């Protein structure tokens, strides 16, 4: 049965306002020691590349040509050479084949459509030079020559060949004094895209990686560069960490990085205050995770393992405004950068960090979320059933030698999210899964049995429950607002007998219904049954849940809901992160 708060003149339960807006955010200042630039891994590990094309100076981008050099430990760029070419490709210094297709690919193995070759052997002239200008003067004397920057010196190379013997033979035929040379497994070669024309080679071993910075058309311009269908600000770094293919990193100013994260982590159509909260969280996450992927030579990746980042393809006034109005702001706890997490939807409650991941953090505490339910999240409710046999098959498929399932015991956290699942089998063994594993162990996409968050219940169809949840009356709604289900009296205002609007508090509220006056426990109603620690048995088990994500930190849909209700981005952050403040770096 649904209870509905009805409008009665001078009655204490008449709702007049939800969640009044707060004032402007207070932002402190601390020495946070955050870098001005982020190093974002675009392609790395098993996804590293044989070749990487860059395009600058076309009608769809800004800038013209490139500088070659390196980035130091502080992410400052130092130039050692340059080119006016607008379409360049970085490849490993190995024998490659150039294909005829429009993608201008360079591949290891010959294909039926290859149109040319790029050899890794060259004629090395006998002298080295201390400056780029000296080496460039020599390059002008030889057709097909280019500069190699190797361990802080410049050398001149001529031609490209598939073998040392070919290089020696051509040197003799051309009357060139030099030796056959091929670069180390760290050498990166830069060519004009789609050709075998080498522009530059870089080899400083493991000490430095090739850095490339697009040149602006005029002083102060921010060039935009195309790479694999996306436009990026900043420069790029290329490393052959595996001794084979190339790791590609975008080195970008932190605010430009946030511009490339925000529209992919939150819809551009969402309220500004929600976007601002997301911008602060994304900036904080980047600062807190500097060096997370240090083994690959960058800080954070461009995927959901870190934060989704796709450069500047998607933008808009709301994105620009959200980043600008929060520029330089971070979430802090105790005057230090806070560890922040966020997820799509919490389903009604976030969770303590230690109940999901490993470490307890004082600012990552679970909270009952009364706001998220005021919007549609797309994952408001999901449910499915398992038979004991299906559970056995699922656990067996994941490598656990489980017998026939006799019972499953769910343990819930203080806010009602799942903490652990214990499966007792016919062999007398008990298999216990905790935290995130508890939330994923039964997820089975192929069978349409997906668990999207840790906010779910597991109930057996023949279990005799030892605990009767109270109350069992059903949800409570605001009159005339069917989608606004109440889970707490906090933030509600009512007109009392004096005619003055007074705030309500807590989870208990007395209302006038068709059956008379009743006191309802809103939190318990919202919570529903949570039979923690009680073995569940039966011929089937029903899993019912809501939300999408790991439940730690900020709910993105919750942030949207709070913004629609008039809350500021500071309010949103303070609600989802306990005891934090906003601060800028000094």
Image (tube, rainbow, N blue to C red):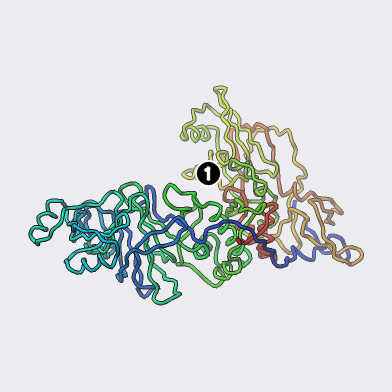
Residue 364 percent location from the top left of the image: 65, 48
Q: Is residue 398 visible?
A: yes
Furthest toward the bottom, the residue is 218
Question: Is residue 364 or residue 191 the one in the foreground?
Answer: 191
Furthest toward the top, the residue is 427
Residue 210 percent location from the top left of the image: 35, 57
Q: Which residue is mark 1?
A: 449
Residue 35 percent location from the top left of the image: 52, 58
Question: Is residue 42 or residue 268 the one in the foreground?
Answer: 42
Furthest toward the left, the residue is 173
Tally of numbered tags? 1
Place residue 318 in its image quadrant. bottom right
Q: Secondary structure at mark 1?
A: loop
Question: Is residue 117 or residue 492 the one in the foreground?
Answer: 117
Q: Is residue 51 left or right of residue 479?
A: left
Place residue 283 in its image quadrant. bottom right
Q: Is residue 380 visible?
A: no
Quarter of the image that includes the C terminus = bottom right
């Amino acid at each position: 049965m649904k209870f509905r708060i009805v409008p009665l003149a001078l009655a204490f339960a008449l709702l007049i306002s939800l969640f009044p807006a707060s004032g402007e955010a207070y932002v402190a200042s601390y020495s946070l020691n955050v870098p001005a630039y982020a190093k974002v891994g675009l392609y790395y590990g098993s996804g590293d590349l044989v070749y990487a094309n860059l395009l600058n100076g076309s009608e769809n981008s800004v800038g013209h040509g490139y500088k070659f050099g390196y980035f130091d430990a502080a992410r400052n760029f130092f130039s050692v050479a340059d080119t006016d070419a607008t379409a360049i490709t970085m490849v490993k210094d190995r024998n490659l084949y150039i294909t005829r297709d429009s993608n201008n690919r360079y591949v290891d193995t010959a294909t039926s459509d290859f149109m040319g070759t790029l050899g890794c052997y060259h004629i090395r002239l006998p002298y080295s030079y201390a400056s780029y200008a000296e080496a460039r003067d020599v390059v002008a004397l030889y057709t097909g020559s280019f500069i190699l920057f190797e361990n802080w010196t410049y050398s001149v190379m001529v031609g490209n060949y598939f073998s040392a013997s070919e290089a020696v033979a051509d040197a003799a035929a051309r009357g060139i004094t030099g030796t056959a040379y091929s670069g180390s497994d760290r050498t990166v070669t830069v060519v004009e895209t789609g050709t075998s024309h080498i522009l530059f080679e870089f080899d400083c071993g493991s000490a430095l990686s090739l850095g490339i910075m697009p040149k602006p058309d005029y002083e102060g311009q921010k060039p935009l560069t195309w790479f694999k269908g996306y436009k990026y600000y900043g420069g790029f770094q290329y490393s052959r960490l595996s001794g084979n293919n190339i790791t590609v990193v975008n080195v970008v100013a932190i605010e430009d990085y946030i511009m490339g994260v925000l529209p992919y982590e939150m819809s551009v159509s969402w309220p500004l205050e929600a976007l601002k909260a997301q911008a602060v969280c994304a900036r904080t996450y980047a600062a807190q995770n500097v060096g997370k992927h240090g083994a690959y030579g960058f800080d954070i990746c461009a995927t959901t393992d870190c934060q989704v980042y796709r450069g500047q393809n998607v933008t808009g006034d709301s994105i620009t405004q959200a980043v600008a109005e929060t520029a330089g702001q971070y979430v802090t706890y105790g005057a230090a950068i806070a560890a922040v997490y966020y997820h799509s939807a919490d389903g009604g409650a976030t969770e303590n960090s230690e109940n999901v991941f490993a470490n307890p953090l004082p600012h990552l505490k679970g909270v009952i979320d009364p706001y998220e339910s005021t919007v549609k999240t797309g994952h408001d409710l999901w449910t499915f059933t398992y038979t004991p046999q299906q559970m056995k098959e699922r656990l067996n498929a994941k490598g656990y030698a489980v017998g026939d399932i006799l019972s499953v015991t769910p343990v819930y956290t203080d806010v009602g999210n799942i903490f652990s699942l214990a499966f007792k089998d016919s062999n007398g063994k008990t298999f216990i899964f905790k935290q995130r594993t508890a939330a994923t162990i039964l997820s089975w996409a192929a069978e349409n049995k997906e668990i999207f968050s840790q906010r779910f219940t597991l109930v057996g169809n023949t279990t005799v429950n030892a605990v009767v949840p109270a109350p069992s009356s059903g949800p409570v709604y605001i009159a005339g607002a069917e989608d606004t289900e109440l889970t707490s009296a906090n933030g509600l205002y009512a007109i009392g007998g004096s005619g003055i609007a007074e705030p309500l508090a807590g989870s208990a509220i007395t209302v006038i219904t068709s059956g008379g006056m009743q006191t309802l426990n809103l939190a318990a109603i919202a919570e529903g049954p949570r039979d923690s620690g009680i073995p569940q048995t039966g011929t089937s088990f029903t899993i019912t849940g809501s939300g999408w994500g790991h439940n730690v930190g900020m709910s993105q849909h919750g942030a949207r809901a709070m913004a629609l209700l008039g809350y500021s981005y500071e309010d949103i952050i303070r609600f989802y992160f306990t005891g934090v403040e906003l601060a800028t770096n000094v």
